[in-house]
Image (cartoon, rainbow, N blue to C red):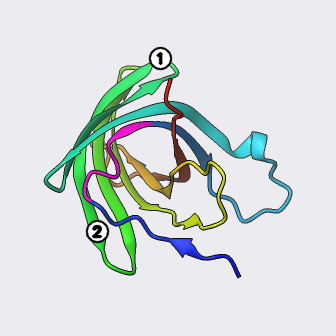
Amino acid sequence: MPTLTLKAQAGTFTGTWVYRSFGVSASPKDTLAKLALGLNELSLMEQGGKIAGKRTGQGVSYDLVGNSFYAAKQGASLRLHGTATIGGKAYNYDYFGYLMPSWGVGGNEPDTILGTVLRSDPANPSNAPLIASFAATREAAK
């Protein structure tokens, strides 16, 4: 059986990541095209357990701040927060993601973060937030 390798070393999240988000649906009839929400880029810098960065793409760019967490035999996770103005309206974005383990079978497997994102409206906190899933894959060196 192939082995899985957890990355739990400080600095793992530093880099540029291709970010894709998807709506959450329990309907098997919903296609990936219908669920696709965003294709962006995350640029992250991690130092001393703190993460700073930017999400850019599709005409929107905003700063991200947060923390990284490392645990032996559990791998790495992150929490990020950002505020973006879309169509003249401000939204808060909160992210939580796990760095997926890699298969020990060789090949060139890029690092991937899988997680969830919550978009809330700070002007109307009683409004239900949008909750989505995301995948972010480390970009290949250019």
Q: 64 or 70, which lies in front?
A: 70
- Residue density around tag 1, few if under 14, some if 14–19, many if 20 or more, within 10 Å: few
Specify which label sits upstream in the sequence, 1 or 2: 1
Magenta extent? 10-16
Residue with the most extreme right position: 29
Q: How many marks?
A: 2
Q: Residue at x 51, y 46 (%)?
A: 136
From the viewer's perspective, is 81 left or right of 103? Answer: left
Residue 49 visible to the viewer: yes
Image position of 29 with respect to 34: above or below: below
Q: 78 or 93, which lies in front?
A: 78
CA gap between label 1 and label 2 equals 33 Å
Give the labeled residue for mark 2: 70
Image position of 18 with respect to 72: above or below: above
Image position of 139 with respect to 108: above or below: above
Q: Residue at x 69, y 59 (%)?
A: 25
Residue 123 visible to the viewer: no
* Disc 1, SS: loop
Magenta highlight on residue 40: no
Q: Residue at x 23, y 50 (%)?
A: 66
Quadrant of the rendered image containing residue 44? top left
Quadrant of the rendered image containing residue 20? top right
Three-letter residue code for mark 2: Tyr
From the viewer's perspective, is 36 left or right of 68? Answer: right
Residue 129 location (% of width, % of height): 44, 52
Three-letter residue code for mark 1: Gly
Q: Residue 59's mark?
A: 1
Dominant SS of magenta comes to loop
Residue 77 location (% of width, % of height): 36, 63
